[in-house]
């Protein structure tokens, strides 16, 4: 198993067009980058996009309640999303595995240890775990705030070296729309940051991302909030380039 671990979260907005359909050109390049950095890192991918994929597959108005509509889009879309990822990674001779999670998987000790063991076993087999929230079974008390939270929990569980939060924005913006390049792990969220960065297809906002980034950085992991559509973003960050907003980690205790 490789010495370094990276958790990469890609948001709905980063891999879809404005109408919610998947951006295949971006996905193809994203998979290429992960396949390349995988030579040096254990990589776990947390990917949103199932809802958007499901909307595209069903391509019709559903006349159920919101929960049922979400379930149908999620379960249909998750199959499509994994089909796409599996095919794209196969072109690079990379095997992937699907992992669907609820909050209970991390709050119950047996579930936590089983989940961690499964991920580490996949790493040993040189397989990339692709994780998403299990929208089918989730009720409010079992749901994550969004996949940023799920990815943050996994980063802490694995004591990851690097955690990438990739969305459709370049980082944390100040009130003038300029990206703030660096934060310390114990730094408070600026009062005047621009926080509206979601679309109808995504749940997370910048305040949520910031809070999760700080929490993970306090745990000893370097965190980056960056634009998933920026050229070679994954390779550049894992090669040591500071792109987007970098959250400096607290030094891990020996």
Image: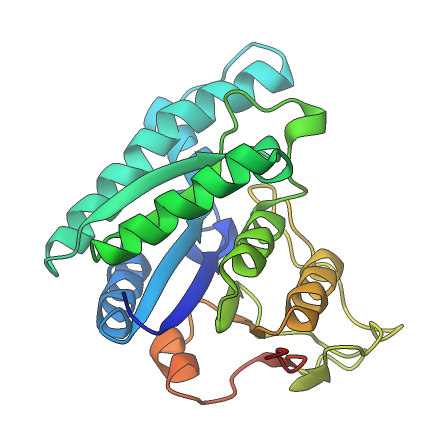
Q: Residue furthest bottom?
A: 241
Residue 93, position in %: x, y? 10, 58
Q: 253 or 11: which is nearer to us?
A: 253
> Is any part of residue 18 visible from this angle?
yes
Residue at image point 43% right, 81% down: 237
> Which picture quadrant has residue 58?
top left
In this picture, residue 33 sits left or right of residue 236: left
The furthest residue to the front: 254
The image quadrant of residue 179 is bottom right
Place of residue 77 in the rendered image (x, y in percent of width and height, measured from the top left): 37, 31
Against 120, residue 7 (above or below) is: below
Indicate the quadrant containing the N terminus: top left, top right, bottom left or bottom right.
bottom left
| Quarter occupied by the C terminus | bottom right
Residue sitting at 48 percent across and 57 percent down?
9
222 left or right of 205 in image? left
Residue at left offset 29%, top offset 56%: 123
Q: Is residue 58 above or below residue 12?
A: above
Residue 123 higher or lower than 185, as above or below: above
């Amino acid at each position: 198993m490789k010495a370094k671990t990276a958790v990469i979260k890609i948001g709905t907005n980063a891999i879809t067009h404005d109408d919610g359909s998947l951006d295949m050109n971006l996905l193809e390049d994203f998979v290429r980058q992960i396949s390349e950095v995988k030579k040096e890192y254990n990589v776990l991918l947390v990917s949103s996009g199932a809802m958007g994929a499901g909307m595209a597959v069903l391509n019709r108005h559903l006349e159920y309640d919101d929960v049922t509509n979400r379930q149908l889009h999620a379960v249909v879309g998750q199959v499509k999303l994994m089909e796409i990822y599996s095919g794209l990674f196969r072109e690079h001779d990379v095997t992937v595995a699907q992992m669907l999670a609820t909050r209970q998987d991390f709050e119950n000790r047996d579930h936590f240890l089983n989940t961690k063991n499964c991920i580490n076993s996949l790493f040993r087999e040189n397989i990339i775990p692709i994780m998403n929230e299990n929208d089918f079974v989730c009720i409010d008390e079992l749901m994550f705030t969004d996949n940023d939270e799920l990815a943050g929990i996994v980063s802490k569980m694995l004591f990851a070296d690097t955690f990438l939060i990739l969305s459709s924005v370049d980082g944390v913006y100040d009130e003038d729309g300029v990206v703030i390049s660096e934060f310390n792990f114990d730094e408070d969220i600026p009062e005047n940051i621009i926080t509206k960065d979601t679309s109808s297809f995504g749940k997370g906002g910048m305040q949520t991302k910031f809070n999760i980034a700080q929490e993970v950085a306090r745990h000893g992991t370097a965190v980056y909030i960056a634009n998933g559509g920026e050229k070679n973003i994954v390779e550049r960050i894992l090669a040591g380039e500071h792109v987007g907003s970098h959250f400096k980690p607290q030094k891990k205790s020996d």
